[in-house]
Image (spheres, helix red, strand yellow):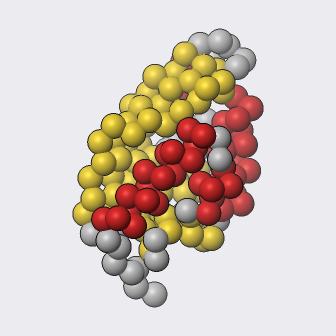
Amino acid sequence: MPVQKQTPQIQNEAVLGMYEDYARGDIAALLEKMHPDIQWIEPKGHPYAGKHAGRDAVKTEVFAPIAVDWEGFQAVPIKTVWQGNNVVCLGMFTGTCRRTGKRLDAAFAHVFTLDGGKLLRFRDFTDTEAFREAMS
């Protein structure tokens, strides 16, 4: 099935809205911006590494552990670039590890593919060493 073309307004609402939802702690609204069959990929070496398939998996395998592991965890977008149905967002992860009390400041590049106004694919490129250092 081909991916539907998106307007910049739909992309903006879906991608930047996701970061806004997370900042407000509104995980339900964030999940609604995702396609039910979203493919969410975290890199090797990341504490939540792997391919997470579907909204429920993202909620339980990524967002739930983050809530346990981090105080004040945020993904702050700095620059966003749109190309067709793909969006790249550059930004920073911040927070404090609950177990160690160490601060996290890690740059990221997030790559999204949208379909029908929903986030269909997500891939995180981040400084996994910064996560390991904060968590150990």
The reply, left or right, for residue 10 in relation to residue 121 is left
From what the image shows, is residue 17 above or below residue 102? below
From what the image shows, is residue 47 above or below residue 112? above
The residue shown at (42%, 32%) is 92
The residue shown at (34%, 41%) is 90
| Residue sitting nearer the eye, 52 or 77 | 77
The residue lying furthest to the top in this view is: 101
| Residue sitting nearer the eye, 135 or 25 | 25
From what the image shows, is residue 15 above or below residue 71? below
Give the total number of marks visible in the rendering: 0
From what the image shows, is residue 33 above or below residue 72? below
The reply, left or right, for residue 65 in relation to residue 21 is right
The residue shown at (30%, 48%) is 80
Residue 91 visible to the viewer? yes
Q: Quadrant of residue 91?
A: top left
Residue 27 is situated, as x and y percent measured from the top left of the image, at: 66, 49
Residue 33 is situated, as x and y percent measured from the top left of the image, at: 55, 62
| Residue sitting nearer the eye, 79 or 53 | 79
User: If the image is split into quadrants, where does the N terminus sit?
Assistant: bottom left
The residue lying furthest to the bottom in this view is: 1
Residue 127 visible to the viewer? no
The residue shown at (65%, 62%) is 55
Residue 12 is situated, as x and y percent measured from the top left of the image, at: 38, 58
Residue 102 is situated, as x and y percent measured from the top left of the image, at: 59, 13
